[in-house]
Structures are given as structure tokens and as C-alpha cells.
Image: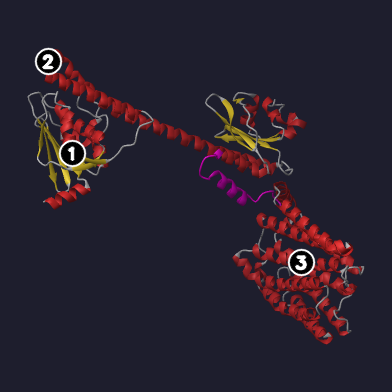
Amino acid sequence: MSSIASYSYLVAALAFLVLCVMLMTRWRSRTHATSVTIAAVASLFWSAALAWQADQGDLPAWSAWTDSFEVLRNGAWSAFLIVLIGSYRDPDSRLPLKLQGWVLAIFSFYVLFFLGTVAGVWHLTSLSESGLMPSVTARVALAVLGIVLVEQLYRNKSLQERWAVKFACLGIGAMYAYDFYLFSNTMLFHQVDPDIWAARGVINALTVPLVAMSIARSASWSSELALSRRVMFHTAALFGSAIYLLAMGSAGYYLRFVGGSWGTVMQVAFLFGALVLLVVILFSGTFRSWLKVFISKHFYRYNYDYREEWLRFTRTLSESGPGLGVRTIQAVGELVESPGGVLFIRRDSGLYEPQSYWHVPVENISEPADSPFCQFLESKQWVVDLNEYAERPELYDDMPLPAWLTRFARRSLVVPLIMQGKLFGFMLLMRPRSPVALNWEVIDLLKIAGNQAASYLAQQDAATALMVARQFESFNRMSTFVVHDLKNLVSQLSLLIPNAEKHRNNPEFQRDMLDTVTHSVQKMKLLLQKLSRSESPVHMAPLAIDKVLIQAVALKAAFEPHPVLELLDAGMKVLADRERLERVLGHLIQNAIEATPKDGKVAISLRRRDDNVLITIADTGEGMSEEFIRERLFKPFESTKSAGMGIGVFESQEYISELGGKIELVSEVGAGTTFYVSLPLHQHQAQTLDIAV
């Protein structure tokens, strides 16, 4: 097996030698040639050292100096991946600012491990059950780190850039993946598998062509790149969890060996407690806030990923449903990790009053618009840091703070909501879960977010005002129709007064008068119900149109000229609301009577035409001009009568159209007018009549 292993690692050494020669000659001017050359040289010495030691009969071939070569080889490839990830450089730094924190942590880890291998305390030749964990765990961690770096490199490249780096990711990722397999197997069985170890040289040799292919495409490696904060957050949490679990696993093994008969119980209890603690930490809002702030502070030039933050901000504000005030506090508060707040909006009374609370006790408070506090917010448009104000009030022109602020023990920031240069409102935010440095970037973001939130809140207020205005418009429109109907009822009742004295001894007149008054009172009650909010919905039902017309004509019997009804076809039905249809037809009959002199005629007829009911209302009155019919007749508030309101014909056309019918007319000035009202027969009624015919 030793000869096989020596040949395996010798093949790897030759492959890396060829790669080094290519890099130093043909590809020496390629992008990042220096970093990849260092990694190839380190791999060359590593594989050559292992091949030589395997040839000496050591199997597996490890010693302090071969372990040191392995650490250098892993570190060189990790450095190459970091260089590719952070290809955009800041002019004032030799390292990418967004990677400085990670580089420091990785470099410290490699230095610590390298010193351990040089000292001979972390090599694999002295493996035992008690000494296995620290050494193998460190090697598993190196492999995991390499895989994470490969994943980050590939994930954060665009589709065009992946064309250049995908083979390097496959090759280097395969190296680390095989190392992970080798050392996790060692961790499981407490010994190095000779076959897996021997094949490692050939596996590394097979990855060289993939790396070389990527180097040939390296012209696309140097594009600017920034890591996604979301990916960084989840990667950091995952990587930290892996390190934590490895450490806890090592401690569990230690307890198992030193605990005697209680060892297994102590190990299980310890590992369960460690797992529960990890879950609690990962689900902690304070920990998540701290991790976000830590990543933004140490790995990025700016504190925020503005694309992600603005998408989240607008998505939160744009959600449907009530509670825009609470969502506004939440959206602005999450920018600084604030867990709660109060939103103040200016009212018509001139006071800024709380509109919404989020995770804050409700308080009965208000602030006058002319107070120094509100005047300062409107004139300066500053975000007020209450902690800074407590230490240096002169920075805020010694502005007096409202007394009600003392009720909030965790008060932190006051964010003005500016709309068109005016203070629309302001927001009080509570102390963040994790300390946030209030620098120029955070202040500017809060100011912009406040302005955006003010526009959303103002839009909601405008929509509410518009809805109220439409309700009043609907109410006023209904009132107009009601007043028009009341006018007709008053006209109808007024005719009874001059005839009451004349026919007071006439029993038939008294009965007609009583019926007219009773019907008028019922109509007035219905009209009042329409003006109330408790109006019952309109009920559509099949109606006998001849009975509706008989009732409408009977109510006009007291007028002169008396309308005459002719029923040419009886028993027809239409689908409509009885009270409203009767009122509409009554409007048209009333108009015909009022437009006709007392010696004239008003004739009403009912007949069927195809699948429709045709109602004809003809008079011999004044008539109308074509211009009036075309431009004014069907418009509201247009009338030729001195006491008319111009509503009856408009309402009639609106309702007849709702029923699927239409109104037509023929008129001649001085000769009279004829209205034709066409309504569709009720479907069942139309089929029955067709069968009868």
C-alpha cells in the first residue's frame, strides 16, 4: 500500500508542477496569477513531501512538517478564494474592506493551527481515543471553511462570471470535499483509512485540469463584487453553529471518557443542553440583531444593503389591510433594530397625537404643533438622538423636550416625518436590541424612510377623506332624488286642499283623499329610510307591470288633465324593485301632466313588443326642441319648468338602464311628447307567453 500511496502523491506532485510551470511562463500575466501560483507551489511541496514519506514506509505518512505543509496548502487555496471573492479593492486598503473581518478570523485560525502542527501537538501520528478530537476536528473545520468559501465565490458571481470560475470552484471544492470525507471518516472510526488516504493524491491530481481550465478563462475574474448581506448572515450563522457543535461534540467526548460509568449519561445530557442552547440563541431577536450589526460593521463599507432594505421597507408599507401605522413603525424601526415605537400624526385640532403603538404601552399624550419641539423638528428636519441630547443638549439648540417623553423608559430616537417641507408627524423609537452607531449613513436613511413613510400615511389620509367625500356625495345625490320625490308628493297633496272644502260632504272624494294621504305618508317614510344608514337593500322580484301602472296612474287621478291608461296586453311581468319602478314611471307621468294644459290629453298604454314590455306615455303639451332633448333633457338639474329640479328624467333613465331597458321619445314643440319605455320581460314569463302563443 505504501508504494501505491507514494505513486498517488507523486502523480499529484507532477500535476501541480505542470500547473506551476504554466503559471510562471504562459499564464504569468493572467489575473490573480500570483495568488494561484502560490497555492499551486504549496500543493506541489505538500504532495511531494507526502509521496517521499509514503515511500519511506510510513502509512499514513504524517509528521509535524508534513502537517505544516498541509496547513500551508489549505491556507494558500483559501487565500486564493478570498482574493477572487473580494476582487474589488478600496483605494486606501490592500485588502477588500468587505472581507477584512473574515480575513482576520481565517488568518488567525490558520496561524493557530500552523503553530500547533509545528510544535507537533496536532499531528495524526499520535492518534488515540482521547487525543483524536482536537486534531481531526481542526482538519474538518479547515475543509468546511474551504467548502464555504467555494460556495460563496460561486453564489455571488453573475451568470457571465460563473462561466470563468465554475471549473476552479469544482476543482478546489473537490479538494476540500475529499478532505472532509477523509477526516470525518477518521473522526467516526478513530483511525485513518489507508485506502482513502492513498487515493487522496490521485484525487488532487484530477482537480488540476479543472483549475487550469478556469485560469485560461481568467479574463472575467476581476469584476467588482459585493457579498449579499443575507447570504453573509446565514453563512455566518451556519459556520458559527458548525464550530459550536464541533466544540460541544469534543467536550461531550471528553466527558464520556472521564465520566466513568456516568460518562454516556453525562455526554447525552451535555449534548442535548448544548443543542437547546444553540436553538435558543439562533431564535433570539437580540442575537440576530447583534449579528447583523456585527457583519455590517466589520465586513462591509456601508451599514446597509440598500436594495434589500428598500424592498423590505416598501413591501412592509404596501401590504394590504389595516394597520398602516403599526407597519410604518415596524418598517422604520427595523432599520435600527428598534423593538417598538409610537407614531404621532397631526390632527385638525393642531395637536400631534399618537395614531399607532408597536410593542409600547398606550399613553394618553399629545404635543401642540406650535411647541418648540415640533418647531425644531419642522425647521431642522433632524433625527433626534435622545441619548446624545441627554449628554450634549447644545447640539440641538437646547431645545426643551416634551414632558411626556419621560414616560418611555427605553426612548431612543425621534424621527420626523416630513411631507412637502412640513412636519406631517414624527415617530418615537425605542432603544435598539443591539447598539447601533448613529452615524451620517443611519441618520440619512432614517430621514429618507421618514419622508417615504409620510407619503404613505398622507396617501392613506387622502384615500380616507376621498371615501368620506364619496359617501357624502352619494348621500347628497340620494337627498336630491328624495327632495324631488317630496316635491311631487307636496304637489299631489296641495291639490287636495282647494278641493277639500268643495267636496267635504262627498264620501267618494273623502275615500280618495284618505287613500292619497295614506300613500303619501308611506312614500315619505320610505324616503326617510333611504336617507338613513339602516336602509334595507333593494329587493328585485318579478312584478306584474300592469298593476304597477294602475297604481301609478291612480296616484295621479287628482291632477288635471286626468291620465288615461289603456292595457293592450295584460299579465306581463318584469324583474324590478316595485317601489322604485313605480316612482320612475310616476315621474314620467307627472312630467307629462305638468307639461299639458288642463284641456289637453295624457294617454298611457301597455303592450308587448317581442320579448319586451313597451310602455307609452303620450301628452299633447308644449313639447321639446331637438336641441334640448340632445343636450339637456337627460342631464341632472336641467329643466324647462320654473319649479322643476331636472331630476325625474335623469333618474328614470338611470334606473331603466339598470334593468336592461331603454327610454326613447318623440317630441315636437307645441304638439306634445311621447315617451317609449321598453323593459325586458321576466325570462320565465317570456317563455310562458311564447308557449301560450
Instruction: Point out the image quarter for the N terminus.
Output: bottom right
Find out whether the residues at labels 3 and 2 contact each other: C-beta distance under 8 Å.
no
> Mark 2 — residue?
503
Residue 633 visible to an observer of this rendering: no
> Mark 3 — residue?
78
**What amino acid is labelled 1 in the image?**
Ile
Distance between the Cα atoms at labels 3 and 1?
Answer: 91 Å
Q: Secondary structure at mark 1?
A: helix
Q: Nearer the viewer, residue 658 or 620?
A: 658
**What amino acid is labelled 3 in the image?**
Ser
Give, as a single range, the part of the protein colored magenta.
300-324
Tell me which label, 3 or 2, sits earlier in the chain: 3
Residue 132, image x and y in percent? 85, 69
Residue 163, image x and y in percent? 62, 70
Q: Is residue 291 above or below residue 597?
A: below
Q: Is residue 428 above or below residue 134?
A: above
Tell me which label, 3 or 1, sits earlier in the chain: 3
Tell me which label, 1 or 2, sits earlier in the chain: 2
Q: Is residue 393 above or below residue 681?
A: above
Q: Secondary structure at mark 2?
A: loop
Distance between the Cα atoms at labels 3 and 2?
Answer: 115 Å
Q: Quadrant of residue 227?
A: bottom right
Q: Is residue 321 magenta?
A: yes
Crowding around mark 2 (Cα neighbors within 10 Å: few <14, some 14 to 19, many 20+) is: few
Residue 129 visible to an observer of this rendering: yes
Q: Which mark is in front, 3 or 2?
A: 2
The residue furthest right is 119
**What amino acid is labelled 2 in the image?**
His
Residue 323, image x and y in percent? 55, 39
> Mark 1 — residue?
545
Q: Is residue 581 magenta?
A: no
The residue furthest top is 501
